[in-house]
Each structure stands twice: as structure tokens, then as C-alpha cells.
Amino acid sequence: MTFLEPLSYDIIIIGGGAAGFFTAINAAEMAPEARICILERGKELLTKVRISGGGRCNVTHAEFLPKELTRNYPRGEKELRGPFHSFMTGDTIEWFEKRGVPLKIEEDGRMFPESNSSETIIDLFLEESKRLNIEVLTKRAVQGLKQKDGRWEVTTSQENFTTEKVLVATGSNPKMWEMLKDLGHTVVPGVPSLFTFKITDARIKDLPGVATDAVVRVKREKLETSGPLLITHWGMSGPAILKLSAWGARELSDKKNFEIEVNWLPEVSPEEITKELQRLKKENAKQHPQNYAQFGLPKRLWQSLVNASGIGVEVRWADLNKQQLEELTNQLSCGTFQVHGKSTFKEEFVTAGGVELKEVNFKTFESKVCKNLFLAGEVLNIDAITGGFNFQNAWTGGFLAAKAMTTDSVA
């Protein structure tokens, strides 16, 4: 097949997702005369933005100190501290509000558009791209990327392109990772992050939808997190589990089966639990433990843990022996559950892995291996816990890359 003369641009963005669009829009505003093009391999744009946050788009998180913000990144914590001093949460809020999309903060710190719809973010990106004359081409899977005579040549199934500067924002696309490896980059193999635990256990079998704060620890690993835990039809989810999966992405990647320990009462020590149970045994002697939930636990969860301690519905507090009290303390403070599988969030998955961070200049997000090659978003070996942090990485990287690509001389 013979191609026509390559199409020439000043900046080409590979990847029509969050980081790609944010970079393109900012670059076009900083350099209005620049010819900018976005190449997207699929027929749809911004697909992860659309499904993020249950279709509401968790834009960022209300954490306004760079050092504290970086603590939500299992990979990238050290590298993002500098960039977050240049562009972070407050800048993100201002950026969207300036363009008519105010954000709101929810109780857990997550931030969404006031419209509660990801379509608001998508519409904004598409309208801004049109206003700024950014060319957006879909069904353009990149098949080749090489540098020749100081310019980048980008080959797709339909056309050839040439550009001075190129930004790769393709997430965990294995084909792009291979191309970057061919250019001399080191790529850390990808493994799933942010996954839920499959657990088959009588204690939680009939409790889907029950949620409470808990501390979760992976046995025989130095992995422990806390936060809301949600019992599901297939096992356990919620922020506590998702944070644990993010921090333990590498350690748990090759484990099909492992054990976790759940403390359902993170604010109460085992000694305090035992003391309170003994008080209940004395003061509520004629009551049945199954009938009244204690420690502020959801009633169904309390009943299940009482039952798992060998305490039937007919048993009264006065009837409890030392062994039953000890077992109930254990169930409340350190119950062991067998995990026999992991589930990711289909399209909304996050991958730990990507371009080795030592090979990137985090003042500009330019490759240290190839001049005028920039990288932003999840193509880098950066990932975060759930809560809007992965998008904040995309916005920060995209903004700083745009600034660098439109500045003639960057230190």
C-alpha cells in the first residue's frame, strides 16, 4: 500500500483519553499557532472518563498538600512530589471551573462535577478541542514510531504523520509499551491494581451490601490498610480492599489464594472488646446476644460473627463461657478469611506497570531516552488508590508536558 505525503504537525498526541486531551487542550492554549493532532486507536474517545466513578467521573481528590497527595500513589510517590508543587488539586479545580464545570467535594474527599455526570467532562474536552482547532482522529492505531532527522514519524493503518514533538498517553496498551521498548525505554511489566477479593465464607454469604469501617491485613505479608469495607455477592470490596490491592499489586499478582485478617473494630483493642463482652455478660444476663448488635456494627454482621463464635440464637449472655467470649473477641478483632480469586473493574481497570520512572524528567514529563518524546498518565509506572488520584496524575502530567512542548527552551 502506498501512502501519500506524511501529514505534518507540531505536536501529536497518541491516545484519546484523559491525559491525551488535557495535554492537547493546554498545549493549544499555550501555543495557539501550533498544529496539534490526537490519534486514538478506537472508535470512541475518553472511554475511561465515561465510566469513571460509576459514570460520574471522579475528577480529583480534595487533598491540597503535595506531600500528603503523593502518599496515595503506591508507585510514583517520590516522583510526583515536584510536579504536584507545579500543578495539583487546586489548579485542577480552577481549570475546570474557569471552563464552566464546577466541582463538588463529597464526604470521603472525592470530587465530581456538580452535574454528577461524566458526560459533562467529555463534552468540555470535545468542545475545547473543537474551539482550539485540535484535530481528533479515531480508528488510528499507531503501528510505528521512530525519530528521523530530528522529527518523529508516526505510522498508522491509514496515514503517515510527521511531527516535531510527540506525547504518548496510551495507558497500559501493550503494543505501545513494545514500541517504547524498541526506542530504548525500560517497561515494568503490568499487573492488575485496584481489584476486589473473591471470598466464599459462611460468615459473609448472606451479607451483600453490608458496609463498615475495618482494618484489613494480608497474612504473611507487610500489607495493611483501613477504611470502609463492603461485603459483596462475590466477597469483599470497598476502599479498604481496593487500597490493599493497590499497595499489594506486585506482591499479590502471582497469588491465586491467600489469607486476610479483618479487624471489624479498628478503634477498639482486643482487651477492650473482651472487657466490654464481660460487662454485657454481667449486666445483660437475660438478653440474647443475637438480638442486639454491639460496638455500632451493622446488625446482620454482628449476628453472623456471634453465630460463627458458636453462640446460637437461644443462648443468653449469662450462658456464655470463657471460650465463647474469646472466640467472639477473635471474630471481631482478627477474623481470618481465605481469598481464592481477584476481580478487576472490567473497563475501569488500573494497571501497575509502565515506563520506568528513572527514564523520565518529571519537570517536563519528557523522556530522558528520546528527545521530544513525552509521556503522561498510566503509560508511566504510576498508579494510585481509588478516589480520583489516577486522574490527578493525568492532569498534572498533561499540563506540565503541554508547557514543556510549547516552550522553546525548557531547563
Image (cartoon, rainbow, N blue to C red):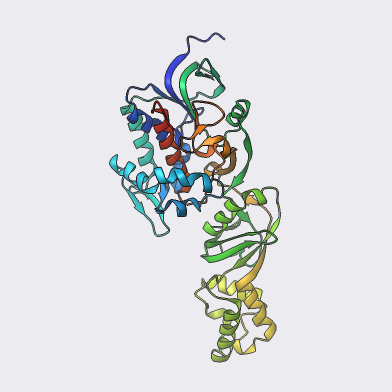
Q: Quadrant location of residue 263?
A: bottom right
**Which residue is depicted at the point 37% across and 35% down?**
125
Q: Quadrant location of residue 218?
A: bottom right
Expressed as whole percent of the image width and height from the top left, the position of residue 291 reads: 54, 80
Expressed as whole percent of the image width and height from the top left, the position of residue 36 reads: 40, 24
- Quadrant for the N terminus, please: top right
Q: Nearer the viewer, residue 249 or 164?
A: 164
Q: Would residue 76 appear left or right of 19 to someone viewing this image?
A: right
> Vertically, is 342 above or below 36?
below
Q: Would residue 125 appear left or right of 378 to someone viewing this image?
A: left
Q: Nearer the viewer, residue 272 or 140?
A: 272
Q: Quadrant location of residue 202?
A: bottom right
Expressed as whole percent of the image width and height from the top left, the position of residue 237 reads: 56, 57
Q: Do we see residue 229 in this rendering?
A: yes
Q: Do we see residue 87 in this rendering?
A: no
**Which residue is depicted at the point 41% across and 53% down?**
65
Expressed as whole percent of the image width and height from the top left, the position of residue 99 reads: 29, 39
- Quadrant for the C terminus, please: top left
> Vertically, is 379 above or below 345?
above
Residue furthest front as drawn: 411
> Vertically, is 81 above or below 174?
below
**Which residue is depicted at the point 67% across and 81% down?**
324
